[in-house]
Image (spheres, rainbow, N blue to C red):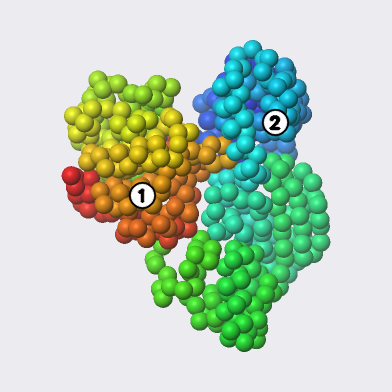
């Protein structure tokens, strides 16, 4: 699966570079098509004998993929990447800058990375460029400031599959007894600085050799029997630490963190006249597993996601945190009626395969022109089509819904009369995401209080590492959501994860209902659910507080509550 993701991201990157270089739309599209085909592929690409049998994959792309599968390298990819300044791809992270604008900045203003972009704005070089008004430059400057402060952290949606594939490949090495990733990745944080891997083995040399010669290693920074560090071609740093099997638990606890959690644990140990460090808990023989260490300190096992010193040592009983298996429905998904790539029936089949009792079809509303949002007449036809599919497919309930825009002033993008015909309304902000905090609060409150709205989709509209999104008064939203029985969404897409973890605990404590949805546009998007679950767990979310965990009848009753 991760090979598919790696290859898809390479083809996407090639498409972007070709576009920055001003190559023909045909070449760009061909690469994008292959990337998407790989993303949608259910089976491992390496297991397919004839790659041209994949729709969208031509002969030359098939050869590129084959070479990568054989050698771990793709010459065309390397050549393209070396044909532009490497920092230009970082410039693409600035919200509002597409390949065409980046090309203009590069060719006409000598922008080659984030730093030179800032310089070009400051010294007025951009003022004289065509199609670059004062307002545009202001917007770029603001978006750039966000990228500058968000630093070099990688989204969990990239880091997690990467870490898993590294572990999978190392697991096969002789002599391995334990191996796991630690750090903020294990705690399920939305972005990750670097990947920490911890292992115990009877053959440290074989493990360090295997680690340092993995396919995607660009530079080996350190190589020893207890510690190795490499930088991958993607720029990601990965550290491997090898510890004695009897101390694996202590080391895993230490390297999983957080620092703040480790400090309060150490203080607890000291009070009990014990000593806890990265190697062991003394005096005792319980350093081989985390469970044993917690038990020795008189604590239950604390899930990694809540090790943030947010009260986890103080509470009598750790709540039963939500898991993937608790999810019984997905209430925010798109079809080909707007900007999705699945028909209603395909969407239903994927949901059935996941064991859901209910799936909601929530395509975009009329204001979302670029996403092919539905005008009222089309929505009425769509509702009919969904009802027909629902009647034809017994194994699942298909809800007719909409992801209706919350307009700038808080009104919704359809009349109430039309909204009342829907089984479910997810109301989301998409435009005007830089309005003031007070405007944003008023806007979202209006939607929360609307009797026909069930869920507020991605409440702030932030995009991780790219867009700050709205900054409403979160406690006010939580109070209103609890009062009106409107659920706040955790959008599981790893670009969004909105509501974010830090807002979630307040929402859970404040009695609001939550909803974890994948916002799937393609089959592969369903896989993102786990990031929503991790985020929910970081906010101490239990299945009782999440509408997606309701039984069928309870969910339907909740939808009809007004
Ligand atoms: Zn949306
Ligand atoms: Zn959506």
Instruction: Write the residue at 46% across / 42% down.
Output: 471
Work out which quarter of the rendered image holds the N terminus and state it.
Answer: top right
In-image side of 167 versus 519 (left or right): right
> In x, y percent, where is residue 518?
42, 42
Residue 352, compared with residue 126, is above or below; it is: below
Q: Nearer the viewer, residue 68 or 336?
A: 336
Residue at 60 percent across and 38 percent down: it is 146
Classify residue 89 by image quadrant: top right
Tell me which corner region of the image, top left, top right, bottom left or bottom right, holds residue 465.
top right
Looking at the image, which is closer to me, 153 or 218? 153
Q: Residue at x 48, y 33 (%)?
A: 434
Callout 2: SS: helix
Q: Which residue is mark 1?
A: 476
Above/below status of 330 relative to 435 = below
Kindly identify which residue carries mark 2: 118
Q: Position of residue 489 (x, y in %)?
A: 38, 46
What residue do we see at 62% from left, 87% from top? Answer: 273
Q: Is residue 161 left or right of residue 483?
A: right
Can residue 271 be seen here? The reply is yes
Quarter of the image with the C terminus in it: top left
Q: In screen coordinates, is 552 left or right of 408?
A: left
Q: Residue 404, located in which quarter of the rendered image?
A: top left
């Amino acid at each position: 699966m991760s090979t598919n993701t790696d290859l898809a991201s390479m083809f996407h990157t090639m498409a972007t570079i070709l576009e920055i270089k001003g190559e023909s739309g045909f070449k760009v599209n061909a690469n994008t098509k292959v990337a998407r085909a790989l993303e949608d592929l259910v089976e491992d690409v390496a297991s397919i004998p004839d790659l041209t049998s994949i729709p969208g994959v031509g002969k030359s792309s098939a050869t590129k993929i084959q070479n990568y599968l054989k050698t771990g390298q793709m010459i065309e990819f390397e050549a393209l990447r070396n044909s532009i300044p490497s920092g230009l791809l970082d410039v693409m992270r600035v919200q509002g800058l597409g390949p065409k604008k980046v090309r203009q900045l590069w060719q006409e203003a000598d922008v080659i990375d984030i730093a030179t972009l800032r310089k070009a704005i400051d010294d007025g070089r951009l003022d004289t460029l065509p199609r670059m008004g004062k307002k545009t430059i202001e917007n770029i400057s603001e978006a750039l400031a966000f990228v500058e402060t968000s630093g070099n952290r990688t989204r969990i949606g990239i880091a997690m599959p990467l870490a898993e594939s590294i572990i999978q490949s190392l697991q096969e090495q002789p002599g391995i007894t334990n191996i796991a990733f630690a750090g903020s990745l294990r705690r399920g944080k939305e972005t990750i600085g670097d990947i920490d891997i911890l292992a115990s083995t009877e053959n440290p040399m074989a493990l360090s050799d295997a680690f340092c010669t993995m396919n995607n290693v660009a530079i080996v920074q350190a190589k020893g029997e207890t510690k190795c560090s490499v930088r991958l071609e993607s720029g990601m740093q990965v550290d491997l630490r090898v510890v004695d099997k009897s101390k694996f638990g202590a080391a895993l606890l230490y390297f999983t963190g957080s620092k703040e959690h480790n400090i309060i644990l150490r203080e607890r140990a000291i009070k009990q006249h014990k000593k806890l460090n990265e190697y062991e808990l003394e005096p005792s023989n319980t350093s081989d597993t985390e469970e044993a260490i917690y038990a020795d300190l008189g604590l239950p096992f604390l899930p990694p996601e809540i090790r943030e010193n947010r009260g986890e040592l103080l509470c009598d009983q750790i709540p039963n945190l939500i898991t993937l298996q608790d999810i019984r429905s997905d209430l925010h998904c798109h079809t080909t009626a707007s900007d999705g790539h699945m028909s209603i029936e395909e969407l239903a089949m994927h949901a059935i395969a996941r064991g859901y009792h209910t799936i909601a079809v929530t395509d975009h509303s009329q204001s979302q022109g670029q996403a092919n949002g539905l005008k009222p007449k089309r929505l009425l036809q769509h509702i009919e089509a969904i009802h027909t599919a629902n009647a034809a497919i017994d194994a699942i309930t298909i809800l007719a819904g909409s992801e209706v825009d919350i307009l700038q002033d808080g009104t919704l993008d359809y009349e109430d009369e039309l909204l009342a015909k829907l089984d479910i309304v997810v109301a989301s902000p998409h435009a005007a995401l830089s309005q003031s905090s007070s405007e944003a609060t008023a806007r979202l409150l209006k939607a929360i209080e609307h009797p026909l709205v069930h869920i507020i989709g991605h409440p702030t509209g932030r995009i991780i590492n790219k867009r700050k999104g709205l900054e409403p008064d979160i406690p006010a939203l939580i109070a209103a959501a609890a009062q009106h029985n409107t659920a706040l969404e955790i959008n599981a897409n790893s670009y969004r994860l909105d509501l974010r973890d830090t807002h979630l605990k307040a929402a859970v404590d404040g009695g609001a209902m939550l909803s974890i949805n994948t916002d799937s546009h393609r089959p592969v998007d369903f896989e993102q659910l786990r990031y929503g679950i991790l985020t929910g767990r970081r906010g101490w979310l239990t299945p009782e507080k999440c509408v997606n965990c309701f039984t069928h009848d309870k969910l339907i009753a909740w939808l009809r509550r007004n």
